[in-house]
Structure formats: structure tokens, C-alpha cells
Image (tube, rainbow, N blue to C red):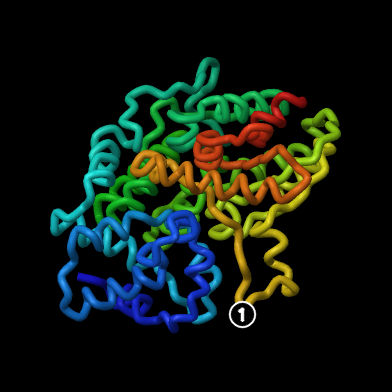
Amino acid sequence: MYSEKAKKHADACRFCYMCRHLCPIERATGRENNSPRAKGLQVSMIVRGMKMDKASAVTMYECLLCGACTADCVTGFDPLVFIREARTQAMLEELTPKFAEKVIDRLMETGNAYGAKESKVNFEGIDEEGEILVWLGNAARYAVPDVANALFSILNKAGVSFAALKDEPASGCELGDMIGHVEDVRILAKAAAEAIVKTGAKKVIVLDSHDAAFFLHECKDWGIELPEIVTATAFVEDLINEGKIVPKKIKEIVSYHDAARLARDMGELEPARNIIAAMGAELQEMYLNEKDNKNPKNMACGSFVRARECGSSLMGQMKPELSVMLCEKRYTDLLRTDSRILIAADPQATEALRLSVPEGVEYRDLFVMLNERI
């Protein structure tokens, strides 16, 4: 049942072990079977006749799909391709682990991983039609509504006329990560696109980087037409550059966490950093950050080392204890700097990093922080 593309990538590994040192899950658990290389070997054996078992299925779900392995493989080894298809196989063969099955059920029933039926965001006074639409995503709608409210406030202070959907449909991104890019996921993506087009939007400001990457990549590949997609960080950076918002200056040392899909999938590194600079803060980059690792001086074994991911909404709902371990690793990176303030600009990163803030350290969401200073 695996596509030729998935088979090709499963066999592309040259056993250099670089992904083993870069995968946040493997680094957190210390288990070899959690490395992308090990997952590739399992899929390769399954393609050759070995039956998938429950242990293999569990391994396929102990993955953030963050792309650290893909970004750093010089042979083009892309585990995300076959891991998603392995999850499809697990579902079809009724091998999906219980911790993943409960999240899939919630996504099917409510459209979000939390099983929530009502958003906690304040939509008072916000229209549902307009040329600029704000797309929040599930993490901001249900887990960290203060981030969504902060973005709304920033846009209002800047005099931006915008719309937002109180009953925003699921994009299909999260379900696609859980069961693979099957037809049910494409149906959700088409329905989301139709809801967006119906608002009359010419531009969509996307707060959740997972949805932004999904709209820009998967939806485009499937021929699903959407208005212009722009990340919330890029849009807010433009507002600052145009003088529509002027942040109050602060004298603090901070560090910034690159959300994987914002930095890797879309190559967006500067907007959040420029917003931090506009607030006057001194930025100290952490070990394993995406910006510095674009520097050829940081090459390792012919490959770029990359930013460490801190977790996701799906992993937080499937395995909260693993999400805490991932956060602890990222805060360890922070403690190697002179900063004791960590900032991120993605709702799922905010949700994850708020799980386990060490004593003496402060976590701040970029949009909440900016809103307090304008």
C-alpha cells in the first residue's frame, strides 16, 4: 500500500546517523527505535513482506513530523513521507495505538485534538466577511486563546479591518498528520478553502504555522485554490515597518525559539526576530537555532544542524509526558545563554512550552508580549 515515493525514501538512508543526533524525540527518549533511521528500516522491511505490528505502529506515532531529519539529510531522505503512510497503514490494519486513536476520534468528532466544542477566543465585534481574514488554527482557538486575542488587539490598534470565523472549520492539517494524506483529509481541506473563499478574503493571515504550511504546500499540490496566505509574524512585521504600530522599548535579554514549520517548512526566520528587535530587546540565539545554523560555518558532516523542536498540540494530547521531556530539552538550551526569557511566535509552540517552565525562567508568546507594549 506504500507509494513508490514512500518506498524510495524508506530505502534512501545511507546509515550516517546524523538524524539520530538531530531528532528531538530520539534525543528526549534516548531510544534508537525513535530515530528516523530506525523508522525507515522498519518501513523498508514491511514493504519487503514483514507484517506491521503494534510496536511498529507505536514507533510511527512517536514523531513530531518536525522535519529536522529531512532538512539535514544530504541524500534527500524524507521520513515524513513514509511515516504518514505508515500511520495510514496502522489505521487500516487496526493497529493504531490507543493514545493516538483517542486523538483521531476527537479530530473526527469535533475537528480538534482537544475534543472541545466551543472556542475560548473573544470574537465580539469581529466580522465574518472582509478582504483580510485571520485564520487562527485549533491551538489558538482552544488551548491558548490569549494568543488569538492578542493578535486581534494588535490588528485593531494598527487600524486593520479584518474578519475571523467564529466557527472556523478544521483545515485538515492535524488529521493529515495523524492518518496520512488520505481522501478524508483532502475533503476537509477543500471545505476549509470554501469557507475562506466565502468570506470574500483576498489575504489570509494565518496564526498557526502548521496550518500556514499546509495551505501553502499540501493544498497547492492538491490544486485547492486559496487567497494569498501570509503568516501572522510577517504581517505584523510589516505593520511595524509601516509605522502603524510603535512598540515601547524594553531592556531585556531574550532568546527566540524557531517553530519547525515556520522556519523549516516556510523558511521564515527574520520577521519574529525583527519584531523582537523593534521592542528593543537584546536577542541571544540558543544552541540549535535555525537562523545561525544557516551559516556555512556551522556545517557538520556536510549537513546543517537545525533548531530543536519543543512539541506540538498533537503530541501534547497523545503523550503529554513526552511533550514535557521535549520542553525540558529546549529550556536546557535557553539556560546555556545569558537569557532567562524564552519567546516563540506559534500557538502550538506556546502551548507546548508553557507545560514545563523551569524556576527562574519566563516564557512569553511574541504576540502577547507585543500587545502589552503598544
The residue sitting at the bottom extreme is: 14
Q: Quadrant of the C terminus?
A: top right
Report the residue at 21% width, 52% height from top: 96
Q: Is residue 175 left or right of residue 237?
A: left
Disc 1: which residue: 301
The answer to whether residue 325 is left or right of residue 342 is: left
Quadrant of res 37 = bottom left
- x and y percent of residue 278 in the render? 81, 39
Q: Tag count in the figure?
A: 1
- The residue depicted at 27 percent of the width and 63 percent of the height is 86
Residue type highlighted by circle 1: Cys
Residue at coordinates 82% horizontally, 43% vertically from top-left? 282
Q: Nearer the viewer, residue 335 or 350?
A: 335
SS class, disc 1: loop
**Outermost residue toward the top?**
124
**Is residue 348 placed above or below 268 in the rendered structure?**
above
Q: Is residue 194 visible?
A: no
Q: Residue 336 location, x and y as percent? A: 71, 51
Please indicate, yes or no, whether residue 174 appears anywhere in the rendered image. yes
Residue 323, relative to residue 15: is it above or below? above
Left or right of 337 in this view: 329: left
Q: Quadrant of the N terminus?
A: bottom left
Where 163 falls versus 123 (above or below)?
below
Please tell me which residue lies in front, 206 or 87: 87
Residue shown at the point (45%, 56%) measured from the top left: 25
Percent position of residue 164, x then y: 50, 29
